[in-house]
RNA sequence: GGCGCCGUAGCCAAGUGGUAAGGCAGAGGACUGCAAAUCCUUUAUCCCCGGUUCGAAUCCGGGCGGCGCCUCCA
């Protein structure tokens, strides 16, 4: 079996074939840095993280580029409202974004190009389109891409330009365009832009939204690369326009595989500020959940499936993760036990890893992948109960579990498990009380430990302490 | 109006022609001094109505319900 992915361009699942053997270039649409990213945004970044980790798991070397949109209507509007420069304003949210990326254990991209650092690349791209006569400058001073002069337009979304509802959501000042479907490449400076603007062959202004992704993706990945991702809402017009601009300017195919993830909804409803169900990562953390718990929630639904977020789901995730943690803890301990033979462990491990791999290779089918993990946990626990796994066998099982986690990224961070001397002493006293069959005292000590946040588990090999 | 997605146990969620994975929660049991952890057993007329088929959650038609995109929203 090999990796297959659902390509939005062909609307079918197809084998993934990289342009260069063994190497994959991935571009993902990143945040517009004008506020805190919400959990819906992170759903998309989580899916991209899963893709990236799966590609690596399958042996590919991945180059990942994620843009930061730091100049657009909203960043300009809100920075002015805040009375600070665009750069100072977006810097705040860039910082917050990277903190969140870290909390959610998203693997960092290789490049995070910001739009404002690549204005030159965009001007060059627009220049190429002007030279080819595909773009034009309208009476309002802005430069537009002419769909009429690019018949290949509309590969991703089957839109009929004639059917587009002119005027409905098109601001009046855009009537300068030759056709409603034309989109801005360069927006002429206007009063609301304040200090923000760059000089160009078409006068002072700023780039349109779509052009940044075309310019920055080809800058870092070349004009033709493997995979481009984003949320479904970006298919049209953003990605459609990117394809048109890039292919028209560069004269070659832009992207081989387009992947889009479905949206996240909350308790069955669209997430919105007015509905009061709008959550940022920080909101979730304030409710007492940790990054990996939200990570699990965002990861556990297939990316093309609408994800229904709820705090119940966070609770479920916590319990599921504790099960994984407990299993790993047992395995760690068991590596120190006597060798119980590696046959059963090895066979079961290979089988589990294969099932896990097969599921992911099937368009990142996470549910069966997780099922493979939990089946493995159950069988592994059974072998541990039976005492048929120890020493090298346990190490083998542990190795496979950690290999799985290289994709999931949800297991307990190692943390040296430092047990305070005081806790250790109480546990020792409790054990002594148990030996003396003074159970009332033993239970009192256990309650005391519990109040301090520690759980005692009595195993055949002695008590085990863990944070609860 | 155009394009598209979805409806499977109390909750989340796979499966897309041969009588239903997995997680959480619940029930019973084993283990334990009691617990915890773990294991075993157990919990589904697959939204409705027709149709195709030897056989449908799975394909087709029609309903009902939820969600998304249609110019800068992941």
Image (cartoon, coloured by chain):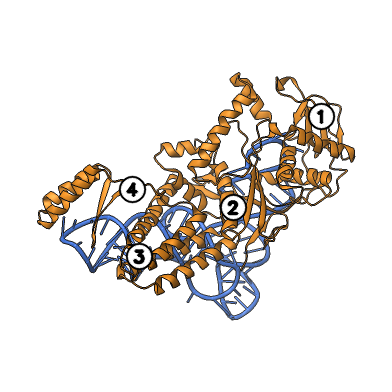
* Residue depicted at 56% across the width and 28% down the height: A92
Dots 3 and 2 on the same chain:
yes
Q: Are marks 2 and 4 in contact (CB under 8 Å)?
A: no
Q: Nearer the viewer, mark 4 or mark 1?
A: 4
Give the SS element for disc 4. Answer: loop
Distance between the alpha carbons at the discs numbered 4 and 1: 60 Å
Label 1 marks a residue whose chain is: A
Which of the two marks, 1 or 2, is nearer to us in this view?
2
Dividing the picture into quarters, in which one does residue A249 lie?
top right
Q: Chain of mark 4?
A: A
Residue A273 in view: no
* Of the two numbered discs 1 and 3 in the rendering, the one whose residue sits closer to the viewer: 3
Q: Are marks 2 and 4 on the same chain?
A: yes
Q: Position of residue B11 (x, y in %)?
A: 44, 53
Q: Residue at x 38, y 65 (%)?
A: A394
Check disc 1 and report the residue beneath it: A142
Instruction: Return the disc, 2 or 4, that comes first in the chain's sequence.
Output: 2
Q: Secondary structure at mark 1?
A: loop
Spatial CA span between label 1 and label 2: 38 Å
Q: Which residue has dot 4 on it? A: A417
| Dot 2: chain letter | A
Q: Please tell me the colour of chain A.
A: orange
Q: Tell me the residue that label 3 is attached to.
A: A381
Is the C-beta separation of discs 1 and 2 under 8 Å? no
Task: Name the residue that disc number 2 marks.
Answer: A52
Q: Position of residue A261 (x, y in %)?
A: 61, 50
Please state, as top left, top right, bottom left or bottom right, where the N terminus of chain A lies in the image: bottom right
């Amino acid at each position: 079996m090999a990796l297959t992915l659902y390509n939005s361009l062909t609307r079918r699942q197809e084998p993934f074939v990289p342009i260069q053997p063994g190497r994959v270039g991935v571009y993902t649409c990143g945040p517009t840095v004008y506020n805190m990213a919400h959990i819906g945004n992170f759903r998309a970044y989580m899916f991209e993280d899963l893709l990236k980790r799966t590609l690596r798991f399958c042996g590919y070397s991945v180059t990942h580029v994620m843009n930061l949109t730091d100049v657009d209507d909203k960043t300009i509007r809100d920075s002015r409202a805040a009375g600070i420069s665009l750069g100072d304003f977006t810097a705040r949210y860039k910082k917050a974004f990277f903190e969140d990326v870290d909390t959610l254990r998203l693997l960092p991209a290789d490049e995070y190009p910001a739009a404002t650092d690549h204005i030159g690349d965009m001007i060059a791209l627009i220049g190429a389109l002007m030279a080819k006569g595909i773009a034009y400058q309208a009476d309002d001073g802005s430069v537009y891409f002419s769909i009429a002069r690019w018949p290949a337009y509309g590969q991703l979304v089957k839109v009929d330009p004639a059917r587009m509802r002119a005027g409905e959501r098109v601001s009046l000042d855009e009537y300068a365009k030759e056709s409603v479907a034309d989109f801005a490449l360069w927006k002429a400076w206007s009063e609301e832009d304040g200090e923000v603007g760059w000089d160009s062959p078409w006068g002072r202004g700023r780039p349109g939204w779509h052009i940044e992704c075309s310019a920055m993706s080809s800058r870092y990945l070349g004009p033709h690369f493997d995979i481009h991702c984003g949320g479904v809402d970006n298919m049209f017009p953003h990605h459609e326009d990117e394809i048109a601009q890039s292919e028209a300017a560069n004269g070659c195919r832009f992207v081989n595989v387009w992947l889009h993830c479905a949206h996240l909804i909350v308790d069955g409803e669209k997430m919105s500020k007015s509905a009061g169900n709008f959550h940022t990562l920080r909101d979730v953390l304030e409710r007492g959940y940790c990054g990996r718990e939200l990570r699990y929630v965002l990861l556990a639904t297939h990316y093309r499936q609408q994800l229904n977020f709820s705090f119940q789901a966070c609770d479920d995730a916590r319990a599921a993760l504790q099960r994984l943690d407990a299993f790993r803890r047992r395995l760690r301990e068991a590596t120190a036990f006597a060798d119980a033979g590696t046959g059963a462990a090895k066979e079961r491990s290979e089988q589990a890893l294969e099932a896990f791999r097969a599921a992911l290779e099937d368009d990142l089918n996470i549910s069966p992948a997780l099922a493979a993990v939990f089946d493995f946990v159950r069988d592994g626990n059974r072998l541990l109960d039976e005492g048929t796994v120890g020493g090298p066998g346990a190490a083998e099982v542990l190795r496979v579990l950690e290999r799985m986690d290289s994709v999931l990224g949800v297991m307990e961070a190692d943390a040296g498990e430092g047990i305070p001397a005081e806790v250790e002493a109480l546990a020792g006293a409790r054990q002594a009380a148990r030996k003396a069959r003074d159970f009332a005292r033993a239970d009192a000590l256990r309650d005391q430990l519990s109040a301090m946040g520690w759980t005692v588990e009595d195993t055949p090999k002695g008590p085990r302490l863990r944070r609860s």
